[in-house]
Amino acid sequence: MNFAGKVVIVTGASSGIGAATAVFLSKLGAKLSLTGRNADNLQKISKDCEKAAQTFVIQADLTKENDIEKIVKNTIDHYGQLDVLINNAGIIETGTIENTSLAQYDRLMNTNVRSIYYLSMLAVPHLIKSKGNIVNVSSVNGIRSFPGVLAYNISKASVDQFTRCVALELAPKGVRVNCVNPGVILTELQKRGGLTDEQYAAFLERTKETHALGRPGKPDEVAATIAFLASDLASNITGASL
Ligand code: NDP
């Protein structure tokens, strides 16, 4: 895999899978736009990447349209091109049909789906020029249902459908669109989503159901999969959920 000269936007680069992906891609020579809300974390990850590649930090809240516009505009102003968009940022919240509020539903859909829709829409003209690609970070919850995280399941199923449909729409223009669907990965996601220790323990227990290897994955392992799909090695793969 070689990303020399390629410009890559990574959303949610301030933590977990996004941070690991940024560091992984920096070692492969990518020029990175790192985005997230937490400026301190972004600076820290940027320093880790700078040892190997060029980085550019864009602090942005993906629930705000102006911020999404800023990500694409600032990337193009800074680097002059865009080759890969990695839609990784996301949140989780617990709740069933009986107790998920509309506010929670809206928060999940705005962060996990609407932001991908709008950011991709703005990125596509540049990706058509570069014959680039998009990698979305979905989840095993996009494929299977896990009760108790209803709105999260719906949001990730939407990411899968978005991936398949946009892959078909953009294939004639030479742009690939894929997604990764990780099982349980050791990051801050669940605790940030308000899972109690008991719920987190139950969640870890689910690892055995969601992955044949029966152990939680590491952010680096997902980063490698994302990098593969974004690389020229995957030049014949589009519309895939890996
Ligand atoms: P983390 O909580 O460690 O990272 C989430 C990232 O999303 C952070 O960088 C955060 O940045 C960013 N983010 C969240 N909300 C916003 C927002 N409104 N605007 C901008 N950025 C935002 O979790 P993970 O690394 O685990 O999650 C990354 C992706 O992987 C998510 O889409 C998640 O659903 C998916 N996933 C995770 C699994 C797991 O078990 N961990 C399994 C399957 C999928 P900041 O706080 O700086 O804004």
Image (spheres, helix red, strand yellow):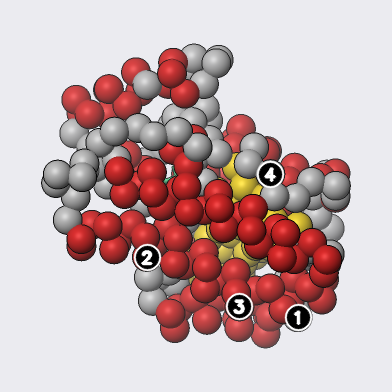
The picture quadrant where one finds residue 114 is: bottom left
Quadrant placement of the C terminus: top right
Indicate which disc, 3 or 1, sits on the residue closer to the N terminus. 1
Q: Secondary structure at mark 1?
A: loop
Residue 222, how many percent across, how many down? 59, 37
Q: Amino acid at mark 4?
A: Ala
Q: Secondary structure at mark 2?
A: helix
Distance of label 4 from label 1 (alpha carbons)? 29 Å
Distance of label 3 from label 4 (alpha carbons)? 22 Å
Q: Amino acid at mark 1?
A: Gly
Residue at mark 2: 110
Image height of 67 relative to 41, above or below: below
Find out whether the residues at labels 2 and 4 contact each other: C-beta distance under 8 Å: no
Residue at mark 1: 80
Q: Amino acid at mark 2?
A: Asn
Disc 3 crowd rating (10 Å Cα; few below 14, some 14-19, many 20+) is some
Name the foreground residue: 65 vs 16. 65
Find out whether the residues at labels 3 and 1 contact each other: C-beta distance under 8 Å: no
- Front label number (3 vs 4): 4
Residue 63, how many percent across, how many down? 37, 70
Residue 90, how many percent across, how many down? 42, 53
Indicate which disc, 2 or 4, sits on the residue closer to the N terminus. 2
The picture quadrant where one finds residue 124 is: bottom right
Indicate which disc, 2 or 1, sits on the residue closer to the N terminus. 1
Residue at mark 3: 122
Image height of 27 relative to 200, above or below: below
Q: Residue at x 45, y 48 (%)?
A: 156
Distance of label 3 from label 1 (alpha carbons)? 15 Å
Q: Amino acid at mark 3?
A: Leu
Q: Is mark 2 within 8 Å of ligand 1?
A: yes
Distance of label 2 from label 4 (alpha carbons)? 23 Å
